[in-house]
Image (spheres, rainbow, N blue to C red):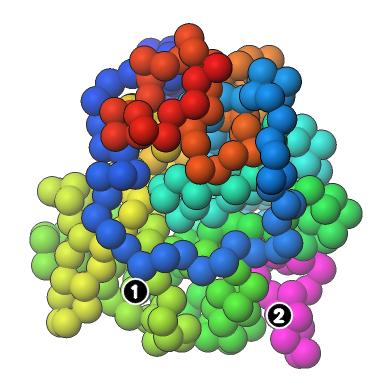
Amino acid sequence: MRRSAALLSATVLLLAATACSERTPGSSAPVPAAPAAAGSAPPVSPAPPAPASVQANELGSIPVLMYHQLSDHPASVYDRTPADFRAELERLARENYVPITAAQLTSGRIDIPAGAHAVVLTFDDSTNSQVHLDPKGDPTPDSALGILLDVSKAHPSFPARATFFVNSSPFSTSGSDKALGWLVKHGFEVGNHTLHHSNLATLDAAGVQEAIASEQAEITKAVPGTPVQSLALPYGVMPKPGSLAVHGSVNGVAYQHRGVYLVGSNPAPSPFDASFDPTAIPRIRSEAATGSEAEFGSTVWLDRLAKNPAGRYTSAGDPDHVTFPEAQAAHLAESLRSRARPY
Ligand SMILES: [Zn+2]
């Protein structure tokens, strides 16, 4: 379904960080801490440089990229070839993006070096092309995970971090429990995408909670103790009421998400921006510069962000504070005033 030009201008406005009153990470209900991030993250300098020297703007927008399936013969706009996927990761590394997980985004724990830009890599539908383990239990080089690890190895500033939003029996060719265990053990985030990929708007309240809680139970059965902090809505469709995507309980299984992810078509506001709404976080589909709805896809958006560097999240290398140019001060979430470091 095509989206209107009005939506495009709305997204451009969003990129310029329009302010309005929404929830901030500080207002979210407490959730257990996320597991350690994957890969060896580049060390944050104990003495960050002057913010102006790296044009720090921690109120800038963050692309949350969405991947589905890798295929040599893409059958839909949701598929990418392994070569295209690798090229996009190489581009991100070259343009000084550093991946964070979805849980890091919503918690505001953005531990990336000064001058780096945050990006969130998300994978939906737990397809076999995303995670595939060889008989020894290592990721195969042709899987999305294998490619991400390889790019990270070639670019030490680009840690292999991502969030996998999974359904029932994820990555089944590798053995679901084994695959989930590998991901969690290596610091990747496993998020919920409902048990059977349900359109949540078609279910009643009990059905919505069942679809979400039963998938969470599957994840925590495979990897005991794993907090499930993030939910990606199948088809980007919100249940009614929307609060059922955030918290609920059925058959003794309670869920509480820090972040709810849409399909979307634009970068997410910074989690420190007053307009950030953790219950409806937009994402960008990975896509070439041409093709159906390419104007909402990753290549076009990464081009736009490169042309408008001031609108993009750029770290000051000081995760204890929120650093931004003085002119952006009106966009800061009220609850973060005590951490503000305008310059
Ligand atoms: Zn999906």
Residue under pointer 1 = 216
Packing grade of label 2 (10 A; few <14, some 14-19, many >=20) is many
Side of 110 where 167 appears, left or right: left
Residue reaching furthest front? 47
Residue reaching furthest right? 154
Residue reaching furthest top? 327
- Labelled disc at residue 42: none
**Residue appearing at x 39%, y 40% in the figure:** 281
Side of 167 where 147 appears, left or right: right
Instruction: Locate the N terminus by quadrant.
Output: top left
Q: Identify which residue, 30 or 61, lies in the foreground.
A: 30
**Can residue 98 be seen from the camera position used here?**
no
Q: Give the quarter of the image for residue 175.
A: bottom right
Q: Identify which residue, 22 or 85, lies in the foreground.
A: 22
Assign a secondary structure to mark 1: helix
The question of residue 47 being in magenta is answered with no
Q: Give the quarter of the image for residue 343.
A: top right
Residue under pointer 2 = 133
Give how far across and how far down residue 52 sits, in percent: 67, 18
Q: Identify which residue, 118 or 267, lies in the foreground.
A: 118
The amino acid at mark 1 is Gln
